[in-house]
Image (cartoon, rainbow, N blue to C red):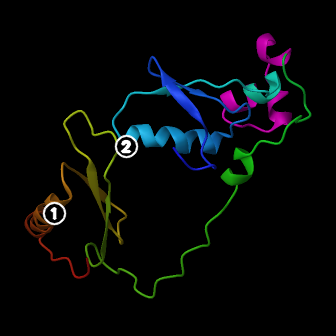
């Protein structure tokens, strides 16, 4: 952590203490990510200057302040106002939209004519059984989907072949486009 743009601090008893008085959330995440790469167990604690209303706004999943005013719980109602005192940096990010996909020229007219697949992973935390990837297969005609949990990416080929065999044996048809 020699760069000027990084937060300065030190690890004491497993807790990272920031020397800077004002540390942004992104700077804190960047600094702590260096410890997760090195497999050291470190936690951080920072104080905040948020109002109670803004803390409730974050804790309740970022509802609008008029919606928060509808809450009848006295603990919440006594500590919020309808006016947002500080702008929430998460709310505008959550409202971003991706551009729509262009319409496909290929349409399925029967089951298993077109099957779309997607491989996702690796998960940072494996499942209870050690799976880090999952393969999703969707029939474009029926919108039926199949999910395969995979321990490694290399298992994709085997599971795709097993799905193809399932379709041929159970449904007596062949996949035309995968």
Identity of the residue drawn at 17% across and 65% down = 160
**Residue to which mark 2 is pinned:** 37
Q: Examine the structure image and report whether residue 117 is included in the region drawn in magenta.
A: no
Q: Quadrant location of residue 23?
A: top right
User: Disc 1 on helix, strand or loop?
Assistant: helix
Mark 1 residue crowding within 10 angstroms, few (<14) / some (14–19) / many (20+): some
User: Disc 2 on helix, strand or loop?
Assistant: helix
Q: Is residue 50 shown left or right of residue 7?
A: right
The single residue placed furthest to the bottom in the displayed view is 105
The stretch in magenta equals 56-78
x and y percent of residue 126 in the render? 28, 40
Identity of the residue drawn at 86% across and 35% down = 66
Depicted 176 relative to depicted 68: above or below: below
* Front residue of 172 and 70: 70
Q: CA distance from mark 2 to mark 1?
A: 37 Å
x and y percent of residue 178 in the render? 25, 76
x and y percent of residue 147 in the render? 27, 53
Identity of the residue drawn at 59% across and 38% down = 28
Depicted 109 relative to depicted 79: above or below: below
């Amino acid at each position: 952590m020699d760069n000027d743009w990084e937060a300065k601090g030190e690890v004491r008893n497993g807790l990272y203490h920031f020397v800077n008085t004002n540390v942004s959330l992104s700077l804190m995440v960047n600094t702590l990510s260096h410890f997760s790469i090195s497999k050291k167990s470190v936690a951080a604690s920072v104080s905040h200057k948020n109002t109670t209303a803004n803390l409730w706004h974050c804790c309740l999943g970022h509802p609008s302040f008029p919606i928060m005013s509808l809450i009848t719980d006295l603990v919440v109602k006594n500590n919020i106002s309808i006016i947002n005192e500080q702008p929430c940096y998460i709310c505008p990010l959550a409202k971003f939209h991706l551009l729509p996909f262009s319409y496909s020229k290929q349409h399925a007219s029967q089951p298993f004519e077109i099957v779309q697949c997607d491989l996702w992973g690796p998960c940072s935390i494996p499942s209870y059984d050690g799976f880090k990837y999952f393969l999703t297969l969707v029939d474009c005609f029926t919108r039926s989907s199949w999910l395969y949990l995979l321990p490694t990416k290399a298992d994709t080929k085997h599971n795709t072949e097993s799905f193809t065999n399932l379709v041929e044996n159970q449904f007596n048809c062949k996949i035309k486009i995968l």
